[in-house]
Image (cartoon, rainbow, N blue to C red):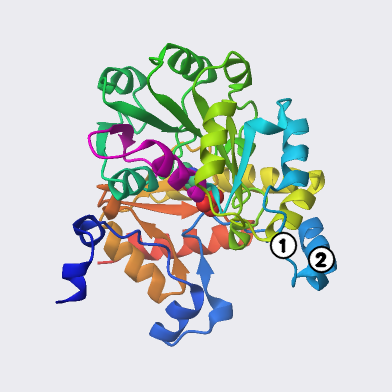
Amino acid sequence: MTVNQLAKPSALTQPVYEPGKPIEDVARELGLDPDGILKLASNENPLGPSPAAIAAVRDALGEAHLYPDGGCVALRGRLAQRHGLPVNHFIVGNGSNEVLELLGHAFLGKGDEAVMGVPAFIVYKLVTLLFGAKPVEVPLVAHRHDLKALARAVTPATKIVFLPSPNNPTGTSNSAAEILEFAGNLPDHCIFAFDEAYAEFLDDPPDLTPLIKAARKIVCLRTFSKIFGLAGFRIGYGYGHPDIISVLQRVRQPFNVSSLAQTAALAALDDESFIERARETNRAGLTQLAAGCTGLGIETVPSDGNFLMARVGDGVLAFQVLQAKGVIVRPLRPYGMPEWVRITVGTAEQNARVIAELATWSQRA
Ligand SMILES: *Cc1c(COP(=O)(O)O)cnc(C)c1O
């Protein structure tokens, strides 16, 4: 008997997430100096981690022989304060991706449907397939989620509706009013999973806490990977209806979040000056990248995230050509957008470098 015969059929057909390649791998493959490589492919923070988080983690290293606080009590307490909701409304995950997976564990199985936009963050589809449920994909209109069409796609079999705003990879968002109306009108038999990975980059993010307080079946997802600069630590959280949170707590591993990640997150939450600097750098960088592309005749889509989509022609070829120069962006062919790449906003200097490479690319014979 082969291993594949032993494996569950669903495991063999499960699509594989293609992450941005690590800098070291690219350097080795292309014979480049890793220090000269610029990775703008995974929406990481160009300023690095929150300095307060680094300091706190250094101080905590001596406790690394101890298991973490499995309940993330201190962090959930701090988040409860921040969002003005009770502690039992919060769950911390190994990245917000883990919270997405916990939603699948708890709510999705054969015969269930999950509604999502396309193109949107690919993990919604992966999680839905992983648990044998059916992804119902609703095309974006003008690169934005079409909330009316999403609502129409809900059936009696729908268990979860996923909505990211701002969306990845498009960078577009829906208005707060529109989202609140959508969330308030979803039928009671499905859960609204609102992905706020980029909320901290918005001036005025939608606030679903009144709906959560009104016991709507909502779970919001946040991450420390983006504005807080802690992607390598793998930590994010969900907050919402306490009964949803309680089921998610039940299906997670007892020590799903490392102690150092918890320490880093707690410190980063209070690092206001870093957050403000990251927001400012991003705002200026979006303007710089968009202007640079426009100057080259490259179409972009106005973004509310820390990344920008650019229509470069052959996205995969542009990715390869830029990568050979040591600049890594994300081709969007896997998202069904072969003419586009997604560029993470960097520092002013990094943005200038990617624009210079795009200039060379767009002038090729
Ligand atoms: C980056 C991102 C996340 C964050 O994932 P983590 O597992 O917390 O690193 C979640 N949702 C979207 C839409 C993202 O772009």
Between residues 355 and 86, which one lies in front from this camera angle?
86
Visible in this render: residue 359? Answer: yes
Q: Nearer the viewer, residue 22 or 85?
A: 85
Residue 239 on image: x %, y %: 60, 33
**Horizontal and vertical percent position of residue 343:** 46, 54
Magenta residue span: 97-121
Where is residue 5? Give x, y as percent: 16, 69
- The answer to whether marks 1 and 2 mark residues whose Cβ atoms lie closer than 8 Å is yes
User: Does the magenta segment cover residue 323?
Assistant: no
- Which percent across, then down, holds residue 211? 57, 16
- Residue where numbered disc 2 is placed: 60
- Indicate whether residue 120 is drawn in magenta: yes
- Specify the label residue 260 is tagged with: 1
Q: How many numbered circles does the render carry? A: 2
Q: CA distance from mark 1 to mark 2?
A: 7 Å
Picture residue at 31% right of the left edge, 46% below the top: 131
- From this view, report whether residue 101 is shown above or below residue 144: below
Element at badge 1?
helix
- Determine whether the beta carbon of the residue marked 1 sits less than 8 angstroms from the nearest atom of ligand 1: no
Point out which mark residue 355 bears: none
Residue 317 placement: quadrant: bottom left
Label 1 neighbour load within 10 Å: few <14, some 14-19, many 20+:
many
Residue at 78% x, 45% y: name it: 74
Q: Residue at x 39, y 65 (%)?
A: 360
